Amino acid sequence: MSKGKVTQVIGSTLDVEFAEHQLPAIHNALKLDLEIEGTKTILTVEVQQHLGEGRVRAISMGSTDGVIRGSEVMDTGGPITVPVGEKTLGRIFNVLGEVVDEKKAPEFESRQPIHKKTVKFEDLEPKTELFETGIKVIDLLAPYVKGGKTGLFGGAGV
């Protein structure tokens, strides 16, 4: 794992300088150890662009308060990953795959990167199983297909 130094911070964007031969790949996760008012935190940033001359531009996945020029950055050697599998059903995660629903975090069998190649259209199997909402008007006039990308929004009294 290579180390770099922050050269510029503008909002949630960081420029980081590495040795020319140790440049992290696009979408690699970088970690910064920060201490703000006595509290130690780890900030994760994701490489988005190679700027040349050993520099990369990265997007922060959290607040950049406390990040200064010269802060040391570690390349994790891989992308941000999130847990997958049966144990993730009904749980709430942030973009880093950390549990945020105040329940005890179980041990997850596997993790997958947040950036993956999409499945080829030819490999998809169409499903026609309907999702029953329990609201008769919606089930009749606008039925939803299970697994589809359909959203339903409403407020009180709707």
Image: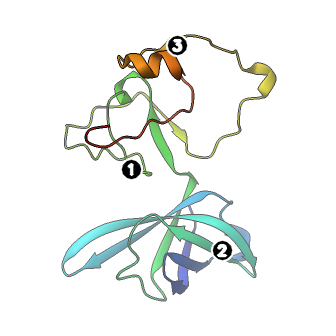
Q: Is residue 9 left or right of residue 38?
A: right
Residue 56 position within the rendered picture, expressed as x and y whole percent measured from the top left: 66, 74
The numbered mark at residue 94 is 1
Residue 23 appears in view: no
Q: Is residue 30 left or right of residue 33?
A: right
Contact flag, marks 1 and 3 (Cβ < 8 Å) = no
Mark 2 residue element: strand
Mark 3 residue element: strand
Q: First in sequence, mark 2 or 3: give its number.
A: 2
Residue 21 position within the rendered picture, expressed as x and y whole percent measured from the top left: 73, 70
| Mark toward the viewer: 1 or 3 | 3
Q: First in sequence, mark 1 or 2: give its number.
A: 2
Q: Which amino acid does label 2 sit on?
A: Val
Q: What residue type is labelled 3?
A: Leu
User: Which residue is tagged 2?
Assistant: 56
Q: Where, quadrant-wise, is the N terminus in this rendering? A: bottom right
Q: Which of 147 and 30 is in front in this view?
A: 147
| Mark toward the viewer: 1 or 2 | 1
Residue 121 position within the rendered picture, expressed as x and y whole percent measured from the top left: 78, 27
- Residue at x 63%, y 76% (from the top left corner): 18
User: Which residue is tagged 3?
Assistant: 130
- Residue at x 70%, y 69% (from the top left corner): 49
* Quarter location, residue 85: top left
